[in-house]
Image (cartoon, rainbow, N blue to C red):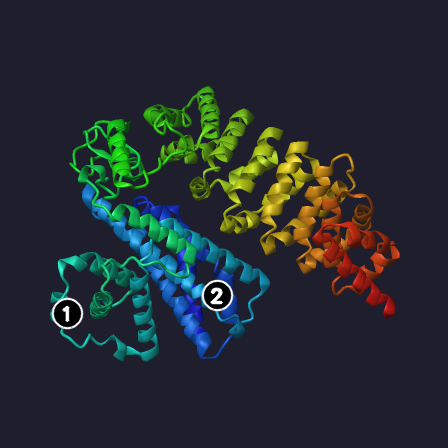
Amino acid sequence: MATAEAAAAAEILREIAAVGTADLAAAAEPLRADCLRLARKVSLLSHLVAEVAEAGEGDAAAAAWVRELVRALEAARRFVALGRTPPAAAGASDKDAICNNTAIQIKYVTWQLQAALANLPHSCFQISDEVQEEVDLVRAQLRREMEKKGALDGTVFTKVHDILAQIDNAGPQSQQPHQQPEQLQMEKFSKDHLELQNAVLLVSEISGLSKSDMTKITSELIEGLENAGTPDSPKLANNDIQSSDEMKNSSEEVKKPDSIAIPEDFRCPISLELMRDPVIVSTGQTYEWAFIQRWIDCGNRTCPKTQQKLQNLTLTPNYVLRSLIMQWCEEKGIEPPSRSKCDGSSHEVGGNRLAIEALVRNLSSSSLDERKSAAAEIRSLAKKSTDNRILLAASSAIPALVKLLSSKDQKTQEHAVTALLNLSIYDQNKELIVVAGAIVPIIQVLRTGSMEARENAAAAIFSLSLIDDNKIMIGSTPGAIEALVELLHSGSSRGKKDAATALFNLCIYQANKVRAVRAGILVPLMRMLQDSSRSGAIDEALTILSVLVSHHECKIAISKAHAIPFLIDLLRSGQARNKENAASILLALCKKDAENLACIGRLGAQIPLTELARTGTDRAKRKATSLLEHLSKLQVL
């Protein structure tokens, strides 16, 4: 492995990770959000690149993998550069095309990063458990991102990837033009292949390929498609992303509308798909609700079909057309399209969009009472339905609420943090909340707010940490885990429960386990183990301990905190689930630790363990039996 290439990877990574909101001020949505999410994910790979660089020279497999990683990072850097470059003035239709083009490119960049991480040759590098966990988290996040972006241009992606590998492996000669003259090759491409050409062009540009390589890839793809006798669509499922069952289900879903010609009036002018939730805009044109809403949310104020200016942003349900679509589906034997929203009146709130926008404006009012009242109402709206959560986020409520977290009025602060908690229930809002910079002010509320605000701040941290890379971000934010531990120690009954839930979720990530122990989490946990008046407290303490004990440093700290006597008491008198978890923690404490094993022997654990091995749950029986075997070996020695 060339250490110079590892250094190049580190330099590219630092450049991408340094990109912030201010650098992307000129970028339109969704490009801006895509760039920020990509920069956050790439920044999590800094420790991996550092350990790879420390490994020094390696074999050919290691060198090839580092080159693959550098290629993926270079593509990511090119994509982020799109967001940093001020766009030229564009019409509404051009903006739509740009959105579609960048969507293909971010899918490829995500796919390439995931492929590189999947091919990491562990035998070539000494990757620590903590770094491996970070890699696994980033891979999982990239997979989810790809699934969220929709069908992948798998064949195009693979061809570009292979061409890049050939260039790296064979040197400059691999970049020679294709055998046939370029012009002759391009003339072979009929209009039927324009979509394929466009996909190749976009992916090749973000990969830094030459025009001759683009031609070669397109030619090979078209030749393969024609030989196979398949349609010329490049959109093939990627086996890394979908299981066979998922691909089968996806295929079945696509066949249903494609098997019968759909009347043009039933298709959305934006997506060209059968509409399930048609709405009318002010120009009289009808669109699928989700697509026209996204168009508007991107800042467009024209009708996509007519290019006329929208006089207002009201979206009126087209019940007549929906009824006709349903009737047509029944006649053709097609499964009727389901509504895109949760309930039957998906536009009950949509009709009040202007009212919601007025509420959001009041969040920035100069009057404290107006700000407080608006935050309270938004808190209530966000609690009621998914529709409201989507509309509130689309109306820029999240950045305004984040600003109110710093309010000196505790009630306003409480309403704001609770509103963000309610908005975070909708998964796509979780990322918007983090991108808006909410983590630090939420932690400040957790430290200094009213008790109800602190409780809801802890619940918000739990909700946001359900996204894996947020576990890393929250855990590494100064004061976050300390504030949760303090709430676990001195909060209300509900506050302790919220803090315990958040801490458990954060401690799934390896590095957060050590942070929690160093923040003093074992003190309240030991107290909770003794709280016989609250069985729930014992459950919560055991659940957190069962996660912490898998880390060596935490295991030593748990032993020093004198947890073993409490755990053995639970073996004797605890409920079935408590006995099972206590046995599991004791087994982890005693593995490869003769001192702890001797301690549980001295404290008389054999009798309750024997009883548990006879009458406990299946898992409890296994743990108890294993502990008894270890004790038996110790006695023989």
Residue 329 x %, y % = 27, 38
Residue 87 seen by the camera: no
Q: Looking at the figure, which quarter contains the C terminus?
A: bottom right
- Name the amino acid type tagged 1: Gln
Is residue 619 left or right of 120 when viewed as pictured?
right
Q: Looking at the figure, which quarter contains the N terminus?
A: bottom left
- Judge depth for marks 1 and 2 and give the one in front: 1
User: For numbered disc 2, what is the local secondary structure?
Assistant: helix
Residue 506 seen by the camera: yes
Within 10 angstroms of label 2, few (less than 14), some, or many (20 or more) residues? many
Spatial distance from mark 1 to mark 2, Cα to Cα?
41 Å
Does the residue at mark 1 contact the one at mark 2 (Cβ under 8 Å)? no
**Numbered circle sitting on residue 62:** none
Q: Residue at x 24, y 36 (%)?
A: 328
Q: Which of 387 and 255 is in front in this view?
A: 255
Residue 614 x %, y % = 79, 53
Is residue 142 shown above or below 416?
below
On the image, numbered disc 2 is attached to which residue?
49
Query: Quick one: label 1 or label 2, which is nearer the N terminus?
Result: 2
Q: Nearer the viewer, residue 32 or 19?
A: 32
Residue 520 x %, y % = 70, 47
Picture mark count: 2
Task: Find residue 316 and report its image quarter.
Answer: top left
Is residue 397 shown above or below 42?
above
Residue 514 x %, y % = 65, 54
Within 10 angstroms of label 1, few (less than 14), some, or many (20 or more) residues? some
User: For numbered disc 1, what is the local secondary structure?
Assistant: helix
- Name the amino acid type tagged 2: Val
Q: Which of 183 and 48 is in front in this view?
A: 183
On the image, numbered disc 1 is attached to which residue?
185
Q: Nearer the viewer, residue 286 or 567?
A: 286
Is residue 289 shown above or below 14?
above
